[in-house]
Image (spheres, grey):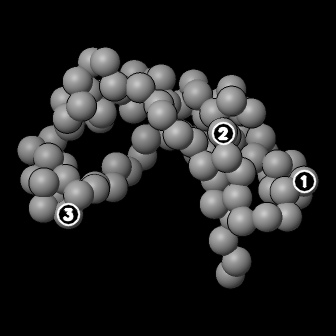
Amino acid sequence: MSESMVKALDREGYFVAHRVMSPHQVVEMCEAIEPLLIACPSAGVRGLANKLPCIRSLAESQTVRALVEPVLGSSARLIRSVLFNKTQ
């Protein structure tokens, strides 16, 4: 994590990390999520990482760990995974 990301996190409480996933990974994830959205007419899907292994894999990937660990430490883990199905 860069110093500018740490500063943004301190200042705003969040930061946006660009290019965490390849375009191919984005397509795969969208294809995995789409059936859940069709089957779930409500506002979202809870426990997404338990329903889709690709979500858990992303959270446990070295790319994501490299962003999380400098702030939260090496024992950081996924607690909640919710997909919000927002209307346009």
Tell which tag, 2 or 1, sits nearer the viewer: 2
**Looking at the image, is 14 positioned above or below residue 74?**
below
x, y (%) of residue 47? 66, 39
Q: Label 1: which residue?
A: 39
* Label 3 secondary element: helix
Q: Is residue 81 left or right of residue 8?
A: right
Residue lying at the far bottom of the rendered structure: 88
Task: Tell me whether circle 1 and circle 3 mark residues in contact (CB < 8 Å).
Answer: no
Q: Is residue 26 left or right of residue 73?
A: right
Tell which tag, 2 or 3, sits nearer the viewer: 2
Report how far apart the C-alphas of labels 1 and 3 lie in the structure: 35 Å
Q: Is residue 64 left or right of residue 26?
A: left
The amino acid sitting under disc 3 is Glu
Q: Label 3: which residue?
A: 12
Mark closest to the chain's N terminus, 1 or 3: 3
Q: Nearer the viewer, residue 60 or 51?
A: 51
The amino acid sitting under disc 1 is Ala
Q: Residue at x 46, y 24 (%)?
A: 61
* Label 1 secondary element: helix
